[in-house]
Image (cartoon, grey):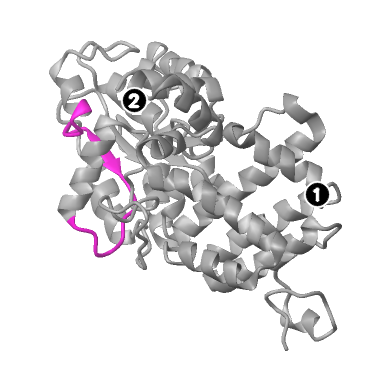
Amino acid sequence: MSWTSVIGQQRVSDALRRTISTERVAHAWLFYGPEGVGKRAAAIAYGKALLCEQGGEEACGACSSCGRVDRMVHPDLHMLMPYPSDADPADIAERIRLIGQNPYAAVDFVRRPSLDDPTRSSNKQALYTVARVQEEMCRAMSFQPVEGRYKVAVVSDAEHLRTDAANMFLKMLEEPPPKTVFILTTSRADRILATIVSRCRRLRFDPLTPEAIEQALIGEEGVAPELAATLARMADGSYTAGLDLAKNEDLRALRELVLDFSRAAYSRNVGKIADIVERPARFGRDQVGHVLELLLRWIRDLMLYREMGEAAALVNVDQAEAIAGFTERLPKADIEAMASVIEEAIVLVRSNVHVALTLTVLAGALAEAMRGPHSGKLYMPLSDAYDGGDASLGRTG
């Protein structure tokens, strides 16, 4: 892993390289931005450069230190990720090894509870506990570097630090051991303690361009150019999403499920809606959220096409005909309200609201919005429902 392996984040790479050449390496960094855009890749490339035996801003890639970083076995580089309480140590080690091979791969417990089955979910929450912070961060980072100039800890998905664990980690950040570098990565900086954020040097990562994702899929994964162009649009700025789509035909098939759901919602075909709802409801909450995100991207394509016609830069570029047909047949559709109820459904699903019920109510709300102005709400508190509000998850009898 080197700077050239970090896709499309030249501003970020240049900034990190300058800190090495000017010897202004911060003891704590916060890499924040959307999922799958290279935060972990940049963190490992930075750590590799800091530990390289040549001592420059670019890792040589040839010394023994660089080789051990590539294999994720360097004693001064600690790769940390949140995991559930029942995680198998061998499974954790395998995921870290896979990150060394490709830091963009979705092999963490948050996005892939099972490496064998990408659609499988887990009832166990992946997180950082007090015991883990004490052992894997505070204790491990308190020793002098074994071989390199620094000790480096990459704390991925740092928003999964429990409050008590975050407070323990904060104490170390307040008085860091010499020659230590902590790199926290997150797509939800708002969920990290403000006191931790204030002690980190922050670096923003932007969504990747479709062109950057397309070229990486062709050059790194050998994806056919025509398919790579389509997947790059579907990936919505995330190379990780592009990789998943390229390697998993089941995920690509979910787009057909999205279209089927939209058609069934419009027709108000209760039997078909029930059948379609049952399929994603078996996937687990993470995968249901992914299906809803695909639906949201499709709705945003409708917005773009309505405004720009054939000049619109669609995410689902291979479904341009279906998108054009929708906008022509349903000119009165409240597309903004459709997007709003889908966004709300994503929040509800991830907040442990009943999945099948959420999707069923969503179908009804979409059917109404497709026919004209809609309130753009799924959930309503029971107190409001008793006052005669609109149909929602909170409505009674």
Residue extent of the magenta highlight: 70-88
Q: Is residue 28 visible?
A: no
Q: Residue at x 74, y 35 (%)?
A: 304
Relative image position of residue 268 (x, y in whole percent): 70, 67
In the picture of the structure, the residue carrying the numbered disc 1 is: 330
Q: CA distance from mark 1 to mark 2?
A: 40 Å
Relative image position of residue 357 (x, y in whole percent): 59, 73
Q: What amino acid type is highlighted by mark number 2?
A: Glu
Q: Residues within 10 Å of mark 1 (few under 14, many from 20)?
A: few
Q: Do the numbered discs 1 and 2 sit on residues whose CB atoms are within 8 Å?
A: no
* Nearest the eye: 177 or 343: 343
Magenta highlight on residue 354? no
* Nearest the eye: 293 or 156: 293
Q: Residue 127: which quarter of the image?
A: bottom left
Q: Is residue 146 left or right of residue 220?
A: left
Q: Is residue 302 visible?
A: yes
Q: What amino acid type is highlighted by mark number 1?
A: Leu
Q: What quarter of the picture does the C terminus occupy?
A: bottom right
